[in-house]
Image (tube, helix red, strand yellow):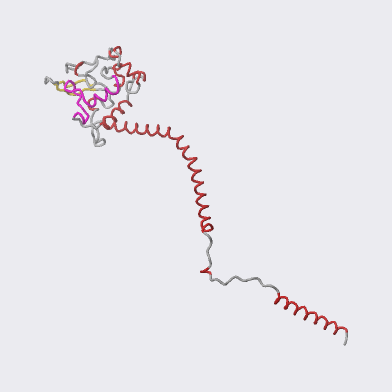
Amino acid sequence: MSLPLLVGLALAGLALVAFFGAVLWINLRRRPARPPEIPAGMRPGPADEVLERGLFERLLGWNVLFVLFFAAWIPALWLREPSQNVADDLDLVSRAVDRGRQWFLPSSPENPFGYGCANCHGMNAEGGTTRFTAPDGELVPNYPVPPLNNVCGGPNTGHPQIKSIEDIRTTIMEGRQPETPMPSWSVRFEGPMSDQQIEDLIRYLVSIQQGVPDDQNVCTNPSAVVAAATPEAGASPTPTGGEASPGAEESPAESPSPTPTPTG
């Protein structure tokens, strides 16, 4: 037998021995224990903590974001509140002034809500005249009506009966009839205007004051109200141009005669 054949047989024998040894090792080695075959529908699910963890973490994240948002938003709102309140008040006053002008002007298709104060006091509250029948029956065709664009000056501008804004309010509400043409305008005294409309009208009058210094404005300056209440302020002279005209600012006690006083 030749050498190559012997070598081939030897290699073949080694291969057979290795093969059968491997088969024997595979069959004799310890196999891991296999779990029982449980259907997927019968297997236990994950614990509640595992199922709820994601939702819980998302909720905590949103809570943190909202806390941070309100921690910044609430102080910003608080710091802005004073200026916002002032802006709101100014806007309310501006609207009241616009409404007061509507009440002051005559009624017209463009202004159906006018009460016609301007018919007597002038379109710009500069004063004017009106027809008036005195209590004794005398007809005064040109009864002088005082201006209202300086009424807040009180005694300093020829309105001796006006010493505060309350006097203006009382005059509008109660009027000064029968001694003057000034009727009552408040519904409390059988007039046509509500309290809110009278307040709007007063705000309009305050907004159109001319030639009334701040230190003499009894509508806006409390110290001027105190000064107007003193005897010296009550005895102050009337403005240049004539005597004080009887009208809406005169009381019955100080205007016993309905006959108008010439103005210049």
Q: Is residue 62 a member of the stretch shown in magenta?
A: no
**200 shown above or below 49:** above
Point out residue 228 in the picture as x, y percentages from the top left corner: 31, 16
Q: Tell me where residue 149 sits by quadrant.
A: top left
Residue 92 is left or right of residue 23, and the answer is left
Horizontal and vertical percent position of residue 223: 35, 18
Q: How many marks?
A: 0
Residue depicted at 20% across the width and 22% down the height: 176
User: Compared to 145, does 23 lie above or below?
Assistant: below
36 sits to left or right of 28: left
Observer-nearest of 151 and 57: 57
> x, y percentage for residue 137?
11, 21
Tell me the quarter of the image containing the N terminus: bottom right
**Residue 147 position by quadrant:** top left
Residue 121 appears in which quarter of the rendering? top left
Q: Nearer the viewer, residue 248 or 196?
A: 196
Give how far across and how far down residue 69 sits, in percent: 49, 43
Q: Which residues are magenta?
A: 163-189
Which is nearer the eye, 264 or 157? 157
